[in-house]
Structure formats: structure tokens, C-alpha cells
Amino acid sequence: MMLTGKKAIVTGGSRGIGNAIVREYLRQGAVVHGISRKPADNQAELEAVAKDAGGALHWHLADVTHEEEVTKALEAILAEGGIDVLVNNAGITRDGLIFRMSTADWEEVVRANLTSAFFTSRMVARAMIKQRSGAIIAISSVSGIIGNAGQVNYSASKAGLIGFSKSLAREVASRGVRVNVIAPGFIDTDMTKALGDKPRDALIAQIPLGRVGVPADVAALAAFLASDAAAYITGQVIPVDGGLSM
Ligand code: NAD
């Protein structure tokens, strides 16, 4: 179990990719603090996984776009001592062509996907620098690398996470803190369920591995990057996309 004894924070873990990361971290023995607006539906199942692996799960209800709320949640977590891993996973879409995109749709997406990572990372990086170890992981998207029509707001926020993470990686590397980015492709979650069957099939046709991804595909890399096995990896952007973006 690669994460035994590690203490991790995962934002937006109530469902989807974040939930799979929480589960995988627990399975590998970590103590996980989930920050989400509501608790996970599978709380009991997650607690059983934690119990089996000797870890623990704590849930903190907060909106990551709300600076005060997220600061309070992080203060409570950091007050209990060290922190080893932060995963900035919470994110939203408000898709539309630029001509039809409202300013609110632009601002909400940038705040939820990018500014939220600034709020959490600023506090957590300070604690990690003091203890001279830690791993920060951002969940970006292939949309932030190759772009996607109808997603100027989302792609900008996800590309922003890449620049943010590379700069932060350079700021904290000398203190033993690593910062990396995962760029998922098309992963089967609530976020992508809205897509109809036809666009879905067209998308699958473009994926070299010939299938959509599952949240566990992303969680496996998130666990590796959080672990000491990734001790010499920082400032990297790693796609988990079945070859879509190559
Ligand atoms: P999802 O909608 O199923 O889950 C998103 C999670 O973020 C939920 O738990 C939600 O409650 C939480 N969240 C959103 N806004 C929040 C806020 N203001 N405060 C606290 N929590 C908040 O989506 P998902 O597919 O699991 O996406 C997870 C991450 O992966 C997102 O950042 C998303 O952009 C990224 N991503 C997803 C895909 C995909 O194909 N599903 C592809 C690339 C990147």
C-alpha cells in the first residue's frame, strides 16, 4: 500500500473522479480529508474501505469558490498536524460557443476550476514547505492542452491550472514539495453523461484506445503521483486519455 501513513486532501470528492481518488487513496492506506459542498452518497462504502486499510475518512463541507469557507475547512485540517497530499479536483463546466457565453458562465468556471486551486494551494503549500515534503496534484483536462470548441471558459481554466502548477512547482521544489498535473480525456462521469449517444460515439472514434475512460483510470495516476514512488517527478502534465491528445 503506497499511501500508508499519508494524510491527503481531495476537493470535490462527493462523486466522479474525485470520489474515485478518495476511494483509491483510502484503499492504499491514506487518511483522507474530503472537501465538498455535500457528503458522498457512498460514504458508508468509503468508510469500510478506510477501515480495511487502516486509514480514515473525514468530510468537510465547503464550497471551494468561497474563500472563507474553504479557508475554515483547511484550517481545521491543518490544525491537526502535517499534510502530505493535496488534490485540486473540484471543477465545473458551463459550455457554449463564445458568442453565446455569458460573463457569468466565464467567471463561474474560472473561479471554480482555477481560483479555487489558488485558495487551497496557497494555504497547503505553506504547511508543506514547513515540513519540507508534500505533493500537490491538479486535475486539469486535455481541453486545456488541445482546446475544445464550446469550452473557451473551461479550456482557459484548465490551461491556467497547468501554468499555475508549473510556476508553483518551481517555487517549492527546493523545499521537497512536488506539483504535478493530470489531464484526463473523456472520462465517464456525471460531467460527461449529458453528451448524447451520437457525439459520444464520434468522440470514441477519435480515441486510439477505443473507449472512454473510467474514474479509476485517473485515480491510479493520482495515487502514484501522491506516493514516494514519484519522488523525482515534478512540474509535469500527464494525460490520462486513451491517446486522444497525442
Ligand atoms: P463531476 O461533476 O462528476 O464531479 C465534480 C465534483 O466537484 C463534484 O463532487 C462537485 O460537487 C465538486 N464541485 C464542483 N464545484 C464545487 C465547489 N464550488 N465546491 C466544492 N466542490 C465542488 O465531474 P468529474 O467528471 O468527476 O470531474 C472532476 C474533475 O475532473 C473536474 O475538475 C473536471 O473538470 C475534470 N475532468 C473531467 C473529465 C471528464 O471527462 N469527466 C475530463 C477532464 C477533466
Image (cartoon, grey):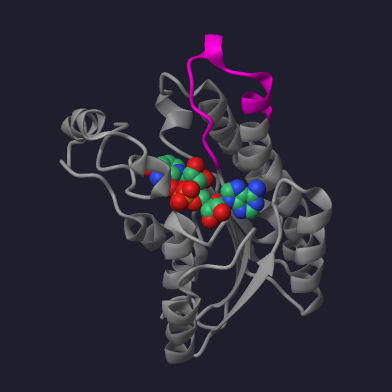
| Residue 65 in which image quadrant | top right
Residue 99 in the image: x percent, y percent? 54, 9
Q: Please tell me whether residue 109 is drawn above or below residue 60 in the rendered image.
A: above
Residue 9 in the image: x percent, y percent? 62, 66
Number of callouts: 0
* Side of 79 relative to 169 (left or right): right
Q: Is residue 236 visible?
A: no
For the C terminus, the quadrant is top left
Q: Residue at x 63, y 72 (%)?
A: 59
Task: Point out the stretch of residues depicted in magenta.
Answer: 92-107
For the N terminus, the quadrant is bottom left
* Side of 91 relative to 23 (left or right): right
Residue 4 in the image: x percent, y percent? 50, 82
Q: Please tell me whether residue 157 is drawn above or below residue 90 in the rendered image.
A: above
Q: Residue at x 43, y 44 (%)?
A: 191
Q: Is residue 234 magenta?
A: no
Near-viewer residue (100 or 116): 100
| Residue 115 in which image quadrant | top right
| Residue 6 in which image quadrant | bottom right
Q: Residue at x 37, y 38 (%)?
A: 194
Near-viewer residue (162 or 102): 102
* Side of 28 relative to 32 (left or right): left
Q: Is residue 96 magenta?
A: yes
Q: Residue at x 32, y 32 (%)?
A: 245
* Side of 231 relative to 128 (left or right): left
Q: Please tell me whether residue 99 is drawn above or below residue 14 in the rendered image.
A: above
Near-viewer residue (227 or 151): 151
Farthest residue toward the top?
A: 99
Q: Please tell me whether residue 214 is drawn above or below residue 98 in the rendered image.
A: below
Q: Is residue 102 visible?
A: yes
